[in-house]
Image (cartoon, rainbow, N blue to C red):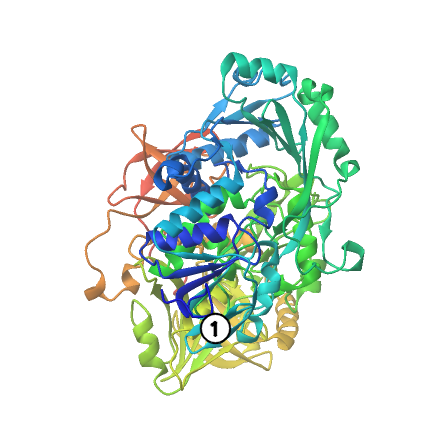
Amino acid sequence: MNTTEKGRLPEKAKVIIIGGGAVGVSSLYHLAKLGWTDCLLLERNELTAGSTWHAAGNCPNFAGSWAIMNIQRYSMALYRGLAEEVDYPMNYHVSGTIRYAHSQERMEEFEHVRAMGDLQGLKMTRMTIEEMKEKYPIGETHDLVGGLWDPEDGDIDPAQLTQALAKGARDLGAKIVRNCPVTGVTQAGEGWIVHTEQGDVACDYVVNAAGYYAARVGKWFEEYGRPPLPMVVMSHQYLLTEPIPEIEEWTKEHGGKLPMVRDPDISYYLRQEKTGLNLGPYERNCVSVWTGPENGGEMPEDFSFQLWQEDLDRIEDYIADAMERVPPLATAGVSSVINGPIPYSPDGLPLIGPMPGVKNAYDANVFTFGIAQGGGAGKVLADWIVKGAPDWDCFDVDPRRFGAYASDPAYCKAKAEEVYGHEYGMHFQHMRWPAGANMLTSPNHETLAAQGAQFAPFGGWERATWFAQEGDDTSWESTQTWKREGPWLKRVAEEVENVKTGTGVLDLSGFSRFDLEGEGAADWLAGMIAGRLPKVGRMTLCYFNGPTGKFATEMSVSRWGEDRFTLITAAVARDHDRDLLTHAMPEGLTLTDRSEDMSCLLVTGPTSRDILAPMTEGDLSASWLSVQETTVCGKPVRLQRVSFAGELGWEIHGARDDMPTIYATLMETEAKPFGMFALDSMRIEKGYRAWGTDLSPGYTLREVGADRFIRKEDRGEDPARCLHVLVLEDIGYDPLPMSPIRAGGEIVGEVTSANFGHRVGKPLAMAMLPRGSEGQTVEVEVFGHKVNATVHADGAMWDAENDRIRA
């Protein structure tokens, strides 16, 4: 790395990382470990000057997200050996953690996370009341139903961790320049010029790891296509007590530290700090900052190594509860209160990966738990840059999971406060979090609501999940269960029956939709996909390989002309798939995003042809997977003969303003509305894959069963495992993705998605298992229950010959 004559800055670096907290330094360290030593980190102050310096340093494995669990698991394993690896001493205490459960639902959540941990080789175990009392004798357990034990949980000194990572990076040849504020960036061809108060540096890739300054740094990239970075800064407090005699006595007798305890149902943790306690609550009446005049105005130019005045009134109730849970806490004085800024995204998860809309620029920011996730985040970020994709399915933290809607300041504020106030909230399958609703809506939204639709967001778009009738319980409380049974179940069964015997109509607003055209479009697109393009007037599924040979995305491709196509993908994949296309697209081709100016209705069921016939000039005798440009109700539409429900049907794609007329006309017939819960039940009966679960970047195309969409000459050897269908014993629960599957006591695979198949009357699941597992009986772990299941080959459990869909 050649240094300029002006001082410490080089003229050029392969990668420049902006921000010297734990995540930024970990990213530098992991790039260097992969051999990219010609990298530079720029920090405006000293390392750890942002959220890192006041972080509590807790290091859990526990996570409801597969990606976050992988990231934290990697971090913990890294930290256990880091001091020796880089020859830098660190205070890292692996004391274990007890999580308290006040309800059966909480224990069921614990059991699912423990089971996911089994898949990742973690050592979490269920605890009895007696075991909790034995490990944490100063805690009250009389009102609990159980607990969860993680022996590998602990805490680390954030400053020492960051300095150890920095030493490791420097020893490998990477460079860190402190007290060097970055002032902006300029795109230069495929690379970047990073401007600083000490001069400019060129680089091939740039990383925004600026912590709670990340939104400000993100603004520099907006002129190059990045939407405003979706984040809000929250005020988070924790307090440290003076020494507590009971803890001093326990430590003297046993050595080490008491385990941490977390009470997620109340929303706080308690951790031994020296011979006192560290109490950290996540309060409902939380405070976001720097979001306007009423919240402290704008972010100051520099808030390095600063805190706010304590505000104990805000967390008084949590302190009182903790004192009842751990009585010795009530006798202790408070030695200090830490009240500092931590960033939150709208879903509480960090942004790690390619910036949406910008080439060769990356996010590694908005870390609510940056110490626990720092090690794994650095690996994921380095893998993105060096390999083109991470080793694990990391879409949960991909910055492109949000659309531009998530950049709305009011939305960000509402969602961040909701997430913070429910940091330990359980994410039940049939519930929705209410904040930030109606950001993107169907042109039929008000009509659907009047019909009783219950909504949930899909990639930001409000879609009907089920239709309630008068007297149905639609309360928040009714959704607080992991069980299948609920007020929705009867209605979903009725909706499926309507589709099975008559015609159902599903408003499918929010498809990510791109029109591709231009001379040579067919040749270019053919080179992008694993299979073959459809003929003119036809459609097919097309799969895209990622750079590491794993699944990148799936799109349905409709061909209107020799070089004219429409590519449709999942709502949540909009930014991801648009970047996949535009970053590789040659000059002369045009890609038009039609996601918001067009909408879609699915009209499906055995009488759907009769329902549609009077409304359209289109040819309804055209075969399955045909596409045509025609009219419905006198409105120009694209009519596609396809149905994710697996029945005779058509997708009607048309202009937003025309859809209310078409929907109203359909509702004047015998057709009835149905929702996404019913669609998911029907699609799994057909063995159709769901984007983001069955279709995961953690799997290869052949593993997800895409053989017929891969050119035969490119398939290679058969994979060791692939998707199968399971028929489960019915215990009233459907397993969540990444529930482990065992045979002979050994883990052999995992569930990718599950639902009750109302047409076949059985609980079904898609599962990744060793190739050739069909015919076996296996055991699926479902919220702590061991459920027998029969393995079937990949395929349809309903209408296996496709007679109904081809009718």
Side (left or right) of 594 relative to 79: right
Q: Nearer the viewer, residue 386 or 541?
A: 386
Q: Quadrant of the N terminus?
A: bottom left
Number of marks drawn: 1
Residue at the location (19% across, 66% down)?
Answer: 713
Residue at the location (46% across, 66% down)?
Answer: 7
One can see residue 66 in this view: no
Residue 214 versus residue 443 in the image, above or below: above
Q: Nearer the viewer, residue 650 or 252?
A: 252
One can see residue 235 in this view: yes
Tell me the quarter of the picture where residue 528 sits.
bottom left
Residue at the location (47% across, 48% down)?
Answer: 759
Q: Quadrant of the C terminus?
A: bottom left
Residue 354, position as x, y percentages in the image:
46, 63
Pointer 1 residue: 193
Residue 611, position as x, y percentages in the image:
55, 69
Residue 318, position as x, y percentages in the image:
72, 31
Residue 248, position as x, y percentages in the image:
60, 16
Side (left or right) of 365 relative to 477: left
Mark 1 residue crowding within 10 angstroms, few (<14) / some (14–19) / many (20+) = many
Q: Nearer the viewer, residue 21 or 385?
A: 21
Residue 571 versus residue 271 in the image, above or below: below
Element on which disc 1 rests: strand
Q: Nearer the viewer, residue 480 or 88?
A: 88
- Residue type at tag 1: Ile
